[in-house]
Image (cartoon, rainbow, N blue to C red):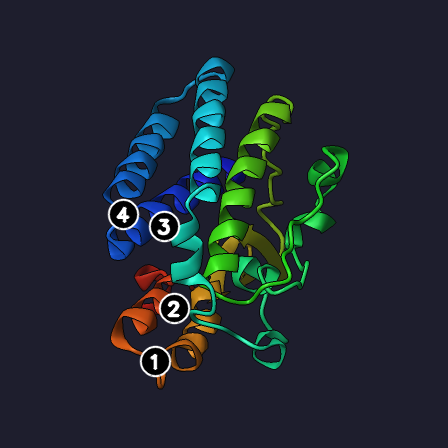
Amino acid sequence: MLERERAASHLVWLASFGFLLGDRVLEQQAAALRRQLGQASDRIGLRRVREEVRALVRQVDRTPLLARRLRGVGVLDRPKLAELDGPVSRAAGAARDVRTEDPTYQELGFRPLALDGGDALARLRLRLGELEQSLDLLLASPADRPPSVVDPSRVGTGQASVETPRGAATLRIQLDGGYVTHAELWSPSQRLAELISPVSEGRELADALLGIASLDLSPWELGR
């Protein structure tokens, strides 16, 4: 479920990024693949999506004008990324990923992708790589496992982190007699929002918009 959501999220981002770039073909292809992924109910459908995603990634790689347009846009230096994770951080060389601690991902031989970039172009390439990786993980994964069940009489505090498409999200809850009495959620977009100024201040408007879009902020996370 997590990898299907990651692939879907990256495709939605790619479609909106294509729109901002004025690349109608990229926008339409990414949007079509997102719909196709949502309709893929078996491995045959997933394999078809995987092949078309591979073709799209190769097409993007063969577009030199796209690379020239994004190189050097929205550059972030390492000190600003020191406390971050997710694609934005991994595009600048930090291979932090909560999935490495998960036994299921370990069984699949998962290794986080990382690039030595730090600009909008690196973030685009990183997400394209993760898009392909997520589909590969989906095809390699075993049958769904039943979810763990919490003891309804449990009392205490629990915390868990999940690697979302934008980075780690952490939920902390307080239980009393099986009921949640307090909950706190830390989302990646709350951390990424601090990068809006570094990628936009002093830039031309078009570059500032591309830099902000390359962060992939979620308004739903920011509204919490």
Q: Is residue 183 visible?
A: no
Please tell me which residue is depicted at 34% across the width and 26% down the height of the picture.
36
Please tell me which residue is depicted at 47% across the width and 69% down the height of the picture.
72
Residue 211 is labelled as: 2
Mark toward the start of the polypeptide (4 vs 3): 3
Give the foreground label among 2 and 4: 4
Type of amino acid under label 1: Arg
Q: Quadrant of residue 217?
A: bottom left
Please tell me which residue is depicted at 72% across the width and 33% down the height of the picture.
108
Give coordinates of residue 22: x percent, y percent.
24, 52
Give the foreground label among 1 and 3: 1
Give the foreground label among 1 and 2: 1
Please tell me which residue is depicted at 40% across the width and 21% down the height of the picture.
40
Q: Are marks 1 and 2 in contact (CB under 8 Å)?
A: yes
Residue 23 is labelled as: 4
Mark toward the start of the polypeptide (4 vs 1): 4
The residue that label 1 is drawn on is 203
- Gap in angstroms between the C-alphas marked 4 and 3: 13 Å
Viewer-proximal residue, 148 or 197?
Answer: 197
Residue 13 is labelled as: 3
Please tell me whether mark 2 sits on a helix, a strand or a loop.
Answer: helix
